Amino acid sequence: MSSDVRENPSTERADRTRRVDSTERESRAVVEAAREKGWERPSFARGLYLGRFDLDLVHPHPRADPADDARGDEFLIRMREVCDHIDGARIEREEQIPDEDVKALADVGAFGMKIPREYGGLGLTTSSYGKALMLASSAHPSIGALLSAHQSIGVPEPVKLVGTSEQKEAFLPRCAAGAISAFLLTEPDVGSDPARLATTAIPTADGAAYQLDGVKLWTTNGVVADLLVVIARVPAREGRKGGITAFVVEGSSPGITVERRNSFMGLKGIENGVTRFHQVRVPAENRLGNEGDGLKIALTTLNAGRLAIPAMCAAAGKWALKIAREWSSERVQWGRPIGEHDAVAEKIAFIAATTYALESVLELSAQLADAGSKDIRIEAAIAKLWASEMAWKISDELVQIRGGRGYETAESLRARGERAVPAEQMLRDARINRIFEGSSEIMRLLIAREAVDAHLKAAGALADKDATFQDKARAAVGASGFYAKWLPHLVVGRGSARASYAEFGPLAEHLRFVERSSRKLARHTFYGMSRWQAKLEYRQVFLGRLVDIGAELFAMTAACSRAEMLRVDDDDARGRHAYQLADAFCDQSRLRVETLFAALWTNTDATDSRLARRVLAGDYTWLEDGVLDPSEGTGPWIAAWSPGPSEVESVRRPLR
């Protein structure tokens, strides 16, 4: 046979398909193995997706211990004094948080808010922590990012969750005192697919340590961190399974090079970089958990840390509302303040109602987390997803209300003698929240996986594309028993009775809508399972709509529950106002829910999918003619890297 004879193209495609399919299965297996599979505690949000509106799980609204609230309020007074002296414009201009601001934050204990008091921290509740992040991020969002990356996903959280007593004694007091920490998972070619993690941790011959080699990307706080949580792959060996593992690493260890500090469209003060590890020795006692537990630790840490983003989103909403109110009362067009024109009034109403709901979602999720009696993995994920999407819309609407001044920078406004309102900065800063700690697309898939978990368990092999016909037949018998009991409960519920939830007064109709919609959501999930079975996992847009419906239902419930709590606490102005805001928000949310339900089955998904495949195949490259691409020739899409010593000088900047 001639040496230049090639494989048949169809054979090449088949081989490529098999390789991709194999990689996909391996990746899913890794993530699935790290999932927390049990549901030992109740989950309100999980119930929503299963057609169970268990209002008793969130009403009466959970509350913190008064003593804990008092400690949190006392800290917020000190925190506000520090934030009052932070010059956000300077951070924006110099693209760096001044060292004196970091020191002032450390002096009041801001780096130890979530660290238990026995280790030198403040031991604040999640609710108080959220309020502190709202305050900090209103001074400048980079401050919120610094504090949350340190203690929501940095060293304190995983050490607190899974660390040994020795690790807690060694690291938590340092973190509480202001030793900044970072969380290093992402790599240049690895984002949401940890099965491809390339950073290695090779055990030494005597087992006393590990040697780290690899490169980590987008290391928030990594440029200034004293301590790092690093996720790396340990090889399997005799008697040890190895696997993805977590380590606490000293930021000053020999062999660590911060190769660059990255720049972004927003969050100008964020200390985010690229970190290289070359033969970095890490003591075995710095390993968190067992070998192979790293991804599970990372996912658990992210679950707990995700509530930081809703806090910063709520802060953005509050500031946007203040600016929209003041500006729309001051600016006159056609003889009236612009806020009195319907086109602007609609935007103001959206900002006000949604800001109330943002704070309600944050407060309910935080109180559930503090209580510890509920499983909040779905609640936290929903809060992050929904809050980041809504804060982005609020930011966009604020810029539109401000018009040309919304597009103009604060420094430019100041220079020509006007109030320096950084609306365009808010838009730039808010955009990252839809990507941070799991993009919106990944969050929808994560929530969908948890939401359909009961179906996957019931259907078994029916939801496994690799199962044999015989396996599917046996699974069908088992599934029929589950659905025979479950489906009848989805027909009628309390939401069908006009007298239900009467204690909520005018908000009762919204809770009845939530109950009916929860059952409807579960029915549509069943229809999807019946129609696509194992292929449902590829219907990502369909699953995303299901998730978004549940998120809106959760937000409506949070808004109503909080309104009733505020009415009980203050039956005068604030209680009435909370009811008005909750009512307006639920009216707006119901329209979004109805639109999402309609789009489940009436959509352009099939057309969009076909068109996208043709675009990727290059069918329409002629459509790109007539423009220039300034990125051409500047570098590869993904920077290649290989193990070895760094070729650049470290830009690490430890703060003192």
Image (cartoon, rainbow, N blue to C red):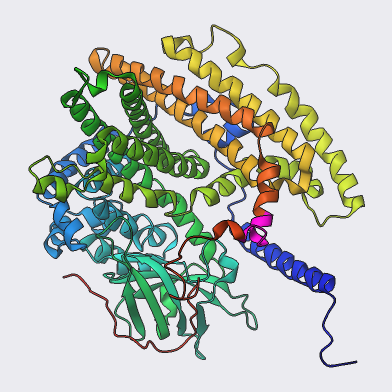
Q: Residue furthest left?
A: 417
Residues in magenta, as a range: 613-621
Left or right relative to 481: residue 114: left
Residue at image point 50% right, 57% down: 299
Residue at image point 29% right, 81% down: 650
What percent of the width, then of the height, locates residue 136? Answer: 22, 48
The vertical placement of 125 against 525, above or below, is below
Residue 620 in view, yes or no: yes
The vertical placement of 481 against 3, above or below, is above
What percent of the width, then of the height, locates residue 60? Answer: 41, 23
Q: Residue furthest front?
A: 626
Residue 60 in view, yes or no: no
Image quadrant where one finds the N terminus: bottom right
Please tell me in which quadrant of the rendered image residue 548 appears: top right
Image quadrant where one finds the C terminus: bottom left
Q: Nearer the viewer, residue 123 or 647?
A: 647
Magenta stretch holds residue 362:
no
What percent of the width, then of the height, locates residue 63? Answer: 35, 31
The vertical placement of 323 against 104, above or below, is above
What percent of the width, then of the height, locates residue 388? Answer: 41, 43
